[in-house]
Image (tube, rainbow, N blue to C red):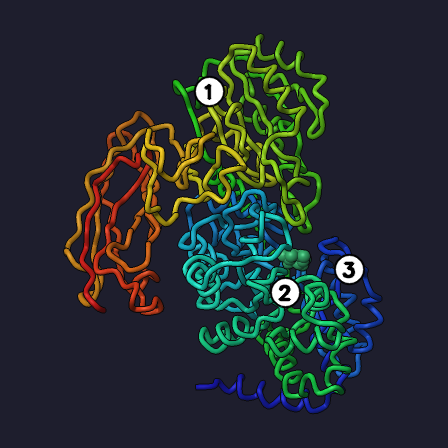
Amino acid sequence: MTSPARTAWLERRQRLLASMTLEEKIGQLVMADAGRAVTGPGGVTDVASDIGRGRVGSVFNQWGVEELRALQELAVGGSRLGIPLFFGLDVLHGYRIIGPIPLAEACSFDPATWEHTARAAAEEAAGEGIDLTFAPMLDIARDPRWGRIAESPGEDPHVARCFARAKVRGFQGQRLDSPSSVAATAKHFVGYGAVTAGRDYASADMSERTLHEVHLPPFQAAVEAGAAAIMPGFNDLAGTPLTAHGDLLTGLLRDRWAFDGVVISDYGAIAELINHGVADTLAEAAALALTAGVDVDMASEAYRSGLPDALAAGLVGMAEIDRSVLRVLDLKWRLGLMDAPFLRIDAKAQAGGRERTVDVMRDSARRSIVLLKNEDGVLPLPQTIRRVALVGPLADAPLDMLGPWWAAAPVDGIVSVLEGLRAALPGVEVIHVAGSAMEGDECGGASQALEAARASDAVVLCIGEPKTWSGEAASRTEIALPRGQQTLCDTLFQSGKPVTTVIFSGRPLAIPDIIARSAAVLAAWFPGAQAGHALADILTGRDEPTGRLAITWPRSVGQIPIFYAQRPSGRPFRPGEHYTSRYIDSPNDPLFPFAHGLSYTTFSRSAPRADRTSLGAEGVVSVEIDVTNTGQRRGEDVLFLYMRRRSSRIAQPVKELIDFTRVSLDPGQSANVRFCLDPTRIPSLCPVRDECDGPDRVEIWIRGHGSSEADESSIVLSLTPA
Ligand code: GLC
């Protein structure tokens, strides 16, 4: 049933379309780079003049109320038809107040936090006129050589599905035409995280099965959650560039998933179809993209210069152009811009918004930190310490705490580890020694760092990647430390003191020797503007470490791609046996597995129990477990529900995550935790899989803090056709 407002809009947009010239129609399909931030190779055009001539429909990489007001006034007051612009920006993990990078956030395994940080970022960005964010990035990533793993929700499809839903809800809120909501763009559709050899922008090639089981689920979740836009990846998929992939952009996205939003190309990607070798001219590139289903051309000349020629040559029809123009106009209407072009620009910041955002980002950063190792309870730092040696180039590196991208964030007001630790330990002397440069070989301060360590009660070493070694166009063939930092560590460990190592990075780092020689290790990723306070909260024990790895942590780059949901081998590894699946120079297992993470307390768990022995026609099966905090401190356990499909004609992953939850317990407290297994929510059991691979039973088990693979307390449920 169409609402009266919708009916009136449909009539209005038809009249508008009928009044538009070809240049004005194509103008609506052009997203111009305003160039205040650099996120791609393209030069910046004369945006203001193009807007006034109706040659631009949207602008990105500009922010600030007055800057956006000036551009909107050009569009509304200066162009013939006065169609408002929409403004896009990469609001990935914050706008002005930056939170932890998405890979870090995924480690919190906390959908409520994922939604809260997106909501906070949306209110900040919309409050200054931004209408659309190019987020959430939903690329499944299993190759830490790829710099953009930092932007991803990690290796697991179920985590990414939950992340997608939470982020779309957070960004878009209850209503897209609210002045505190921004449109979400699910990107980069699809398979970009599987680029060859982890090299950015390279080709990706995978089976249909892997595409449907691993890489598509988070995008389907985003579409089901109502994501307003989709952005195809730069990559080709088995030879077809996503920007020209009609089967996926139209056949799957629109015809099967009923996506009714806008498809926005990635930066210059339509013109880059020529580099892919699938088009010889801009006209051919424009025709391929428009026909495949790309509505908006970000930062290339393809649509503006190529579409008129493509139309004249009969490569596209006016109907295809009109279809995309109407989608763009629909988005502007849904955003409230057609009736209120200055809706967000005139929005007033909500009282107390900044303080709330700071708290949300600090909480998220704290929950994203993963305690990888803690020998002899070195952490939390004892209350008795009087002097701490804080060593390493990342100890006082505020801007590097933000990671590779920080949107509109100011470069001041970022809390470094040094600032956070000193604030948390007012009566303690914190001796800070950088010890080495951030990158390169320089490590002139190593001996000074060693002296500081010898003279202190505790040693905290802050090492890792500079922000520029992570993110887009930052793939690495080695995932180790810069040489100067490695030398600093070698020197520092001569102190004989137990060292707490904090790793800052946009990816797992293969530094097994440093981890082995550290007494405690925290993966802090890039925690954002509240880094110092979040780290201090965990180091001092004010808060418990609750993060768990959303990405497998390899021993070496040679193990990549390494992830937990591998299919079994016909010759599984058996110690001491020659003809088994193994390396001759390394163990098979990672340094730390997916879902690994320690707490300051311990937990025990009962064997899982199910209220039925079959899953399917009877509907939901309840699986429950009792958890007890057996330690001396309050703590949170994260419980992971895994499944393995048995007796299928297709080799199944050794385990697949199908649900997770967290439980907070005081010392000695127990709780009953229940999972509801709905067969329709488990893609592996849905009819989408070809019938021949239908398993006839599934094995279910639950893992938590301290679980070991040897823990065999599983349940087998027979499958009855739904
Ligand atoms: C970049 C990125 C994309 C981003 C876009 C706009 O090239 O690939 O993720 O949203 O350009 O900045």
The mark nearer the N terminus, 1 or 2, is 2
Q: Which residue is mark 3?
A: 42
Gap in Å between the C-alphas at discs 2 and 3?
23 Å
Q: Which mark is residue 629?
A: none
- Amino acid at dot 3: Gly
- Amino acid at dot 2: Asp
- Amino acid at dot 1: Ala
Callout 2 crowding tier (Cα within 10 Å): few <14, some 14–19, many ≥20: many
| Residue 424 drawn at (x, y percent) | 53, 26
Task: Compare residues 375 and 118 and report the one nearer the observer.
Answer: 375
Q: Which residue is mark 1?
A: 519
Query: Under tag 3, what secondary structure?
Result: loop
Q: What residue appears at the point 56 percent right and 66 percent down from the top-left corner?
A: 230
| Residue 129 drawn at (x, y percent) | 67, 62
Q: What residue appears at the point 61 percent right and 12 percent down from the top-left corner?
A: 450
Disc 1 versus disc 2: nearer the observer: 1
Dividing the picture into quadrants, the one containing residue 29 is bottom right
Decide: is 211 above or below 371: below
The answer to whether residue 342 is left or right of residue 156 is: right
The mark nearer the N terminus, 1 or 3, is 3
Q: Which residue is mark 2?
A: 131
| Residue 192 drawn at (x, y percent) | 56, 57
